[in-house]
Amino acid sequence: MHHLVEVSCTTDRPRSEVELLADTLWVLGAVGVQELDDGFRAAFVDEAAALLAADRLGATYHRVGDREGLDTWRDHAAVHRAGPFVVRPPWLDAVPGSVDLVIDPGGSFGSGSHPSTRLVLSLLSGLVSPGTRVVDLGTGSGVLAVAAALLGATVTAVDTDPASADAVVVNRAANQVADRVHFTMGDASELEGDFDLGLCNMTIDLHERLGPSLAVDVTTLVVGGILRGEQEARVCAAHSRGVDARRVEGEWAALVLR
Ligand SMILES: C[S@@+](CC[C@H](N)C(=O)[O-])C[C@H]1O[C@@H](n2cnc3c(N)ncnc32)[C@H](O)[C@@H]1O
């Protein structure tokens, strides 16, 4: 049995706001989030979590069988282009002429369907070369960590979510980079070490909570998960850094900070 929560875009609820709500669905325990033309649909295994999400987001809720829940989301999964990469789930074919990035997000965030993931991915090829030491703060599915490893980096990936631990193990093996992606379970603020490049794709509230408490020493930091405009200044303040480069998609921005 699965539980579906559906959030719609309306004229008084723009798409950018709904995309933020989609992130919230993951945080509230969704095991799959499917992007629709007019909103998002999330599958939950836990009924109480689904009801809470529906209540908090003003969304519709209904109970469905397994095939209509997580499996339906999987049936609709698509490939996503970002820079040199094409992100695909393992059950779809590789796209010739691209860097093949095979990602099954399982119950974690990071299928490549979200603009924030794609923006950070698209910045990687200019920042990573063989031997670059990368730290991925909030790795989710490991999509950014695995992508950096495919470009030759050695990566330390951290996340608080147990679903992330499972997904990273699967995804680093699927891309033959298990020896270059090391996963640590826990809060990113507890991680220590020196890195050439940090990756941090999180919502602005998490950047503001995490930024001042980070113990890792990072030369260049790529931040995603923020909306264009005032959140760009807020993320710079949170990490006490200035902007070196910027990329946008729709309402979303990713910044290279030094
Ligand atoms: C928006 S997802 C990004 C996933 C993936 N890196 C991507 O770009 O698609 C943010 C991730 O940060 C994790 N996270 C949130 N707070 C964290 C913290 N304090 N320490 C480590 N991970 C955290 C969440 O569990 C989630 O997997």
Image: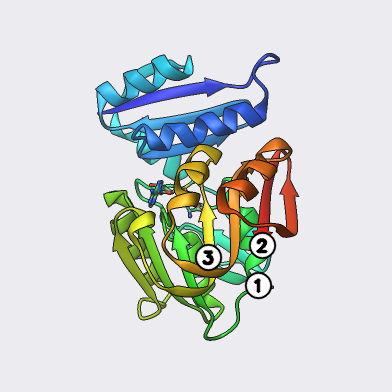
**Res 258 quadrant in image:** bottom right
SS at badge 3: strand
| Disc 3: which residue | 198
| Residue 121 horizontal side relative to residue 229, left or right | left
Left or right: where does residue 208 sit relative to residue 191?
right
Is residue 183 visible in the rendered image? The answer is yes
Q: How many marks?
A: 3
Q: Earlier in the sequence, mark 2 or mark 3?
A: 2
Judged by depth in the image, the label closer to the viewer, 2 or 3, is: 3
Q: Is residue 80 visible?
A: no
Q: Amino acid at mark 3?
A: Gly
Q: CA distance from mark 1 to mark 2?
A: 7 Å
Q: Image point 47% across, 57% down: which residue?
A: 89
Marks 1 and 2 in Cβ contact (< 8 Å): yes
Does the beta carbon at disc 2 come under 8 Å from ligand 1?
Answer: no
- From the image, tell me which residue sits under label 1: 125
Residue 36 percent coordinates (x, y) = 58, 32
Q: CA distance from mark 1 to mark 3?
A: 14 Å
Answer above or below: position of 250 versus 149: above
**Helix, strand or loop for disc 2:** helix
Residue at 74% across, 38% down: 229
Q: Quadrant of residue 124?
A: bottom right
Which residue is under mark 2?
A: 122
Callout 3: 10 Å neighbours few (<14), some, many (20+)? Answer: many
The amino acid type, in three-letter code, at marker 1 is: Ser
x and y percentages locating residue 176 in the rendered image: 41, 78
